[in-house]
Image (cartoon, rainbow, N blue to C red):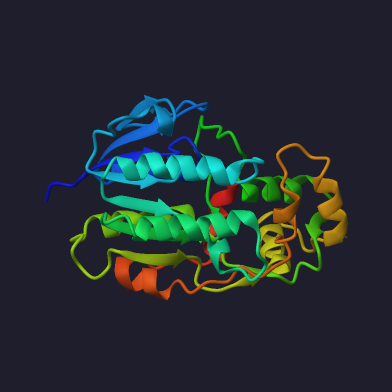
Amino acid sequence: MTRPTLFVTGASSFVGAHFCRLAAAEGFKVRGLWRNTRLALPGVEAVQGDVASIDDPRADVVIHLAAKVMADDAQEQNRRMLDRVLGWRRPLVYASSTMVHWPLEVAYAASRREDEARVAASGLDYVIIRPCAPYGPALAGHQPAHKESFHTLVDWVRRLPAIPVVGNARYRRQPVHVDDFNGAILALLDQDRAGPNWRRAYDAGGPDPLTMRELIRILGGNAGRLWTPLLRIPTSAAWLAAHAVPNMRPDLVRTFAMDDAVDPGPLQAASGIVPRTFEIGSLDLWR
């Protein structure tokens, strides 16, 4: 079977670099778009520039992973990028966000819902996939522009006597290992785009939701800590502090203490990829 050539936006991000690595290893021809952080991976053609600079992706399928989150004009930048991507008129895998399900209305979540609707109405073959807290090992020699949040958390578990958390740390997350997320995309790319698993949206998460307390306990156990105390920061204090931190969106800080639990079953059924537990997958964070 001849596999499609892939054009990956956001290829030098944490998730994007892992996607390019895995896709190339599985025999896909990969063109990865990078802007500020150079991408150098075996079997990946690195294309320097941004989405606006590309007239023709020279690929069969576009994997749109690029997104702005914390910038003040994130919604507008994401809208312009999607305009460009849709204009290429290629089958599309669009990475959205599980924030589309959250009850607290924030501008970023609203823009993601709008963009999903635009993808669905585009007339293209598409898959929308929403990762919940992707995590995994750092790639040797790769330094993405934004440090992956679980890598920061591991650093804190290694170095700090108490781990700062927003709120009571009882809110739930369902982290998905980056190879399970990307592996599900690759499995869908091997399927007939006229089949039942395309033109759908999927949530990608681990098998079970875990509270932030439980996630930190697991990481502490990986580090050999018998007890990992928490330093609780009131959500209101974190919101106020965010006003003084560059590129930190106060409206998004309000969502930190919300549940983010998803149903990974439909994606597992469509792709055949069974997501690993955080207890197992988190061991990769220490590599």
Where, by quadrant of the figure, is residue 287 drawn?
top right
Whether residue 21 is visible to the viewer of this picture, yes or no, is no
- The residue at the point 57 percent across, 67 percent down is 174
Could you tell me residue 247's position as x and y percent? 70, 39
Whether residue 235 is visible to the viewer of this picture, yes or no, is yes
Give whichever of 271, 226 is nearer the camera.
271
Could you tell me residue 211's position as x and y percent? 68, 70
Residue 234 lies, with reference to residue 3, above or below; the image says below
- The residue at the point 27 percent across, 56 percent down is 123
- The residue at the point 71 percent across, 70 percent down is 171
Give whichever of 240, 20 is nearer the camera.
240
Residue 28 lies, with reference to residue 103, above or below; the image says above
Could you tell me residue 6's position as x and y percent? 28, 41
Could you tell me residue 86's position as x and y percent? 34, 45
Apparent side of residue 176 relative to residue 217 in the rendered image (left or right): left
Residue 112 lies, with reference to residue 196, above or below; the image says above
- The residue at the point 42 percent across, 45 percent down is 82
Residue 99 lies, with reference to residue 5, above or below; the image says below
Disc tally is 0
